[in-house]
Amino acid sequence: MTAKLLEALVAIVGARHVRTAPAERRTYARDGLPLQRVPGVVVLPGNRDELVAVVRLLAAHGLPFVPRGAGTGLSGGALADASAALVVLTRLNRIVSIDPTNRVAVVEPGVVNARLSTAAAPLGLQYSPDPSSQTACTIGGNVAENAGGPHCLKYGVTSNHVLALEVVLADGRVVQLGSPGGEPWGPDLVGLFVGSEGNFGIATRIAVRLHPLPRAVRTLLADFASLRSAGEGVSAVIASGIVPAALEMMDRSCINAVEDSVYAAGYPRDAAAVLLVELDGGAEAAVAAEATTVAGLLSTHGARSIRTASDAAERERLWQGRKKAFGAMGRLSRDLVVQDAVVPRSALPDVLETIGRIAATYQLTVSNVFHAGDGNLHPNISFDSRVPGLKARVDAASTEIMEACIAVGGTITGEHGVGLDKLRFMPLIFDGDSLAAMRAVRRVWDPEERVNPGKVVPVHACREWSQARNVERGTRNASADVRSDFRVPTSALDT
Amino acid sequence: MSLLERVRALLGDDAVEIAGGPDAVPRVAPASPDAVALLLGTAREEGWHVRLEGAGTWLPADAPADLALTTRRLDRVPAIEPQDLSATAEAGIGCDLLRQQLADRGTWLALDPPGLAGRTLGSVVATATAGPLRQGFGAVRDHILGVTFVTGDGRLVQSGGRVVKNVAGYDLTKLEAGGFGAFGVIVLVHLRLRALPRADQTFVLAGTREDLTQVAEDIVAAGLQPAALELMSPALARREGWALAVRLAGSAALVAAQEAGLRGASGGRFTALRADEAHGFWMRAAESVATRPVTFRIGGLPDSSDELLDLLQHQVGDEWVSASPAVGAIRWAGDTTVDRLRRLRRTLAGLEVPLTLERAPWPMRSAVGHFGAYREGVGPLVASLRRTFDPGEAFVVAVEGSE
């Protein structure tokens, strides 16, 4: 970073909001992935105008940059190396408006997910996507990753909730995507932008759809003597046509980690698995009837017992255990690898058994806590990276688990994103032309590939694509241009 | 070698049929996604201009081109997975045939697009034409888990997958759904399904537009979540006055509870249709749209629906109108002129409401464009995306229009 650039950054956002000291930069060296990258400089714009000015300055200097929200992402998407600037968006945290009539909210990217629902609740509304990190993660980060959460089974993921976006592109141009009512204005560029992991630019304003708070809720906890029967219970509920608000599974290892922690929810410790099922809706009678049907299906498929939360406090406690399960697993070991594959729901029983076999083969502790209703697995491998040879075993087991999920028609990530973590798996599910198409689309938005370089698309695996016609205003070939020394890790643990 | 000889050599004699229409453009029906790729790769080399067709029942087959590529032989349904509520279908399958195959397996694609029953799946996805079920189940894009498409220079590209949750790579599926074929021809679609609803009831109330608009607001305020809540003009509903049609679908308990809620919110004024009446009601409304020469959709905020309907009435008439007021989506059908359409689009743009031209004869499509002008800064992105996916400008698609 040149002194001239740093001075210009200070002139835009003030000295307090440009972090250059090594200790300050190290604060931002991690997100939720066990990787460490220290950014060249950290800049925290305080409003949209400052953000746009910062992006334009970085463009003028040809400097790569990485947008970052709360840094809770699990795929390394918010990591920047020494050659890049980290643009932290947490100060853009205003809820610009909430329109209860049209059920629309407009927010800045740094607004914390749960804060929006809290603000909307007095109006009888909620923002439905609820990642487990919702008390910390930002809506801007949710848009970048197309974040999910337990209640996305019924209400849809982030992409289903974003109506319109204001975006600052890598070159500093500001564009308006979509329309206030959510109808695409031309091709669906809002849909294309959501989940682009920061590669297409930075959303400066986000219009999202809100939903009415459900008037009736039932939360059930069913426990099973085997993972297979729990998986079969999931399939039975899905095939019945009833769409639960959430349908989550935790295995014994996860249950005991939760029960040993301050988040103990009273889950049965001897169960092989529990299902947490929530039904909600606008009418008490309908929700009650659906809950009865679901309980019947789970009993038929081997549930040993089914407990219904009797009040809001018990419901809260059951959910607290689920949402804090990742934190609770910190008790099991020093390090944790979180996977995010998705499989067809009917494949859950077989895949869970396969994961169990892989864990046994490699003598590793794998805990499962996941969105069973979506088939979105989160096998968590607990380990201590200081033990010689253990990292290699974890890595091999991770790869085998991923391959098993792909073999049954699944995908490598359901909600955490590719980032750096899953780059190496992309060629397992996309061929060279499809990867090249993605890269070409990225270069439509960011011809120099300066925003969040080195993420999502493994460039080495792309087939050649006629790029020359694609680049505007005479930008040169990007691969020669990108000033980033990002390495593609061969493993998530390759620190 | 002539174009026809070249195509026959590539794909075989049975892939080529000569159009009987006045333009006599050769129609080519590749039998596999690879054959589509082969054809378009050759089109790129030869500089052929290609128009895309499905069953030929929605967009008029009138765009000037060297050849027409029809997906009608891509009509297989490789997978229906009732346990996963997903299916994979080729783009040329007719929606009616697909619906039947899905129903046989207890599943349902919750889309009720306008047009004739035999419209192809690819046509519905490429034009993103949702119907009244958009109220309860969302836009076309919300039903698509992934697509395989072929670019204008003959590359097969996959996006998404066949699982219900997926963030691997950029979501190119969103570009294809509603891209009108400008970014590739869709050959395979992975669908999100619902279980066939155990109960499915339609209720209709006739009256003045003002009165029905209020009733629709009351229904939303009561917290009901109907599958469809559609305000329809008299001609479309085949009623004396305007009609508000409510469709409730789901488990028996859910529909019973919603029906009670509907009675409460409306003072019991709705008439329930028998199953056969309901089927006929929705099908006729969908088909009637396709009998008019021009169709477009607009999308605004829900509370602007009434104002937007007034605007349509004033500028282009409102004989054939269908609106989901709680979503803010309106579909218009009828006959109009290029000038009127342009003026309407300009007026709507001032209200931040996009107008998408869904169907019209080629002279109007090419003059007005499916999308027309974009918001500031978006035009260069779209142009660049088009160059990315159709570098030789093989696809004849009127995206922007000539204004």
Image (cartoon, coloured by chain):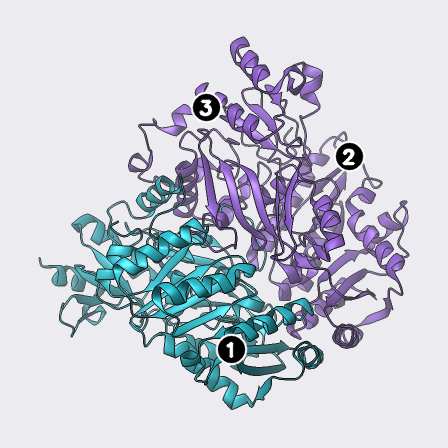
Tell me which amino acid carries mark 2.
Asp
**Residue at coordinates 57% horizontally, 47% vertically from top-left?**
A207
Q: Residue furthest top?
A: A3
Q: Is residue A480 left or right of residue B11?
A: right
Report which residue position mark 2 lands on: A384
> On the rendered image, what quadrant is the N terminus of chain B found in?
bottom left
Q: Is residue B47 left or right of residue B112?
A: left
Q: Please tell me whether residue A204 is drawn above or below residue B306 in the rendered image.
A: above
Say which element carries label 3: helix
x, y percent for residue B108:
54, 75
How many neighbours does mark 2 have within 10 angstroms: few (below 14), some (14-19), or many (20 or more)?
few
x, y percent for residue A278:
76, 64
**Residue at coordinates 46% horizontally, 31% vertically from top-left?**
A170
Report which residue position mark 3 lands on: A59
Task: Tell me what hue chain A is rendered in.
Answer: purple
Q: Are marks 2 and 3 on the same chain?
A: yes
B371 and B231: which one is in front? B231
Q: Chain of mark 2?
A: A
Give the number of the disc on residue A277.
none
B393 and A10: which one is in front? A10
Tell me which amino acid carries mark 1.
Thr
Location of residue A332 by image quarter: top right
**Residue at coordinates 48% horizontally, 39% vertically from top-left?**
A457
Structural distance between the alpha carbons of marks 2 and 1: 71 Å
Report which residue position mark 1 lands on: B208
Query: Dots 3 and 1: beta carbons under 8 Å?
Result: no
x, y percent for residue B273:
56, 88
Q: Are marks 2 and 1 on the same chain?
A: no
Instruction: Tell which chain the image draws in cyan.
Output: B
